[in-house]
Amino acid sequence: MTRLAELAESRELLANLTLRELRGRYKRSVLGWGWSLLNPLTAIATYWVVFGVFLKVEPPVGHPSGLHNYALFLVCALLPWTFFQSAVESSPETLISNGNLIKKVYFPREILVISASTSILVTFLVESTVLLVLLLIAGNMVLPWIPVLILLIAIEYLLVLGLALILSVCNVYFRDVKHFVSLALRILFYAVPVVYPVTLVPEHKTILGIDLPLRTLYQINPLVPLVDCFRSVLYDLRFPDLGQLAYVTGWAVALLALGWWVFSRLEPRLAEEV
Amino acid sequence: MSAAVGVTDVSKRYRLYHERNQSLKASVMRGRRAKYEEFWALRDVSLEVPEGTAFGLIGENGSGKSTLLKCMARILRPDSGRIATEGKVSALLELGAGFHPELSGRENVYLNGSILGLGKRELRSRFDDIVGFAGLEQFIDAPVKNYSSGMYVRLGFSVAINVDPDILLIDEVLAVGDAEFQRRCGDKFAELRSQGKTIVIVTHALSTVKEMCDGAALLEHGHLIEVGDAHDVVDRYLGDVFAPADGAGATTASNVERVELLDAAGRPASGLRTGDPVTLRFHYAIPDTLHEPVLSASIHHLDGLEVARPSVRVEAAGGPRGCVDLHIERFPLLSGTYDVTAALTSAGAPIGVPDRAHALRITVDRGADADSHGVVALDGRWETVTNEVAP
């Protein structure tokens, strides 16, 4: 595993490239880092008004926390979703926008993908800290659950990384990948229980005379149990369902392995194709 | 001496796309990705760069020399063959690659340094050297997008050179910066060489190769033509490029029909040695349109340097054709290959660039007492000063 050894040697490069992403992102904007908080806040406000106030989605009562608040119910899932969405959406461009670097300098190319995902992870961590404060103000004692939260974030990070590795390298060869991804993400947002609770998805539904176990199909998507796990920890204050946790972890590991494999296969000719 | 870079049977193939639309629709319609032709940029190239030497890769554009350098730098992966490198490799293919325009010079030094493989601690200890070498102490906290292109390149070079590689790969980047910066680069390279580092350089500046390099390789259409001593390889390349149309005694264009080299006895000669007595004989035909004709001969070193341009008034006595000799008692040029061209012009008219394709090529061998470096033998006389007056 010389590639892994090489990757380990490039730790500092990873740190520096991540810093480049973070520093460069809001350079010369007046609000600077304020934007990384303003963006999710705007989304939260919008969804809260539309789904919480207009459509009156009824949030479940947190068990055992007893919390009953649509805005917090929303945010506990919206933040992990936003992390997933921003990391996956930007991943197809990662290698192409660094084409000049790829053509002129040798270093393990995975570093570019990892640093891009990591810089978005950092934003997610900042947002999560703010969320923890909000939950504490609302009376949810989340502090003991922080280790579990970190575990969940780590699992999601691996999942995102696997996808980003695949999408970034595929987009170099097929530039449609980028457009496909942004389309898929738009649908996926509503296929994950972010703005509504899972209980609103019917168990069974008859479509064209065929009885479909809709809820089960719905839960194949690993993001569904993932978001559920985040809610268990943050909103309900209980340990996530072990079956769900194992399922999501399985996906994350499988995607990462697949991503690594695809990337290794397509990486040698990157400097010519990018 | 072991090899710092060992290239064994390396081939590299590029794909030339006819239509480069990388879309799924196009590939589905065609049933595959895109039509392309294969093109071999390198074909079975094998060579060794000995440790601690400077090595030049030369050849025309498209000969594959840059591809070979990129393969050595691991940016491109050969389709077959192997490249083994001994030690830390740093490639200077583009200076300041990876600079982020919005970040300051300082931040970019750290970023670029780590891209090139320097650790944070090493960078911190060399930071002042890097900035000092680039001469950018004043501007180091300004964003690099406000730098002039010269400053940008200087900073990039300074970082790259301070990576302290065992093997430095350079692609045509020496030709940047002002004269002062170039001088410092030259010093830096000399320093690296004296430290026993290996340098591989791709360039069109053949005089640089002769000056700086010990060995060189000549590539043509992806094939290795010659590898060996830098002087020999460069001369071989120049000989190919400026090959005379036919052999010795070639005709020249522009009214001078023939140039001959004669030895002391007046016999045609093909070669000579420094210090020999020789005669250059020019056969010409004066056209009617030319008044007060002047014959100008031009002697070029193979490098392109014009060494001399003697000229003489010629008369159209007894017909337009004539012949004129230039006697040289002690031929002053040192060993090397020279091209002699000549042209007839009106007195005072510009001569223009001699057409070297029609030159007489002469090879000068080393004479008994002549030094081998430089272009001319000064024919001077040394004298030890005994009664030196103190300044």
Image: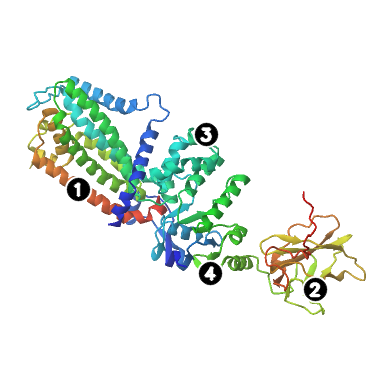
| Label 4 – label 1 distance at C-alpha | 51 Å
| Label 2 – label 3 distance at C-alpha | 62 Å
Contact between labelled residues 4 and 3, with CB atoms less than 8 Å apart = no
Amino acid tagged 4: Ile
Is label 1 on the same chain as label 2? no
Q: Circle 2 is placed at which residue position?
A: B277
Residue B356 visible: yes
Q: Circle 3 is placed at which residue position?
A: B139
Amino acid tagged 1: Val
Q: Earlier in the sequence, mark 3 or mark 4?
A: 3
User: Mark 1 — on which chain does it sit?
Assistant: A
Is label 2 on the same chain as label 3? yes
Q: Coloured how?
A: rainbow
B204 with respect to B141 (left or right): right
Q: Nearer the viewer, mark 3 or mark 1?
A: 3
| Residue A120 x, y percent position in the rendering | 30, 36
| Label 4 – label 2 distance at C-alpha | 36 Å
Q: Which mark is residue B225?
A: 4
| Residue A167 x, y percent position in the rendering | 30, 46
Amino acid tagged 3: Phe
User: Mark 3 — on which chain does it sit?
Assistant: B
Q: Secondary structure at mark 2?
A: loop
User: Mark 2 — on which chain does it sit?
Assistant: B
Q: Badge 1: how crowded within 10 Å, few (<14), some, or many (20+)?
A: some
Q: Badge 2: how crowded within 10 Å, few (<14), some, or many (20+)?
A: some
Q: Secondary structure at mark 4?
A: strand
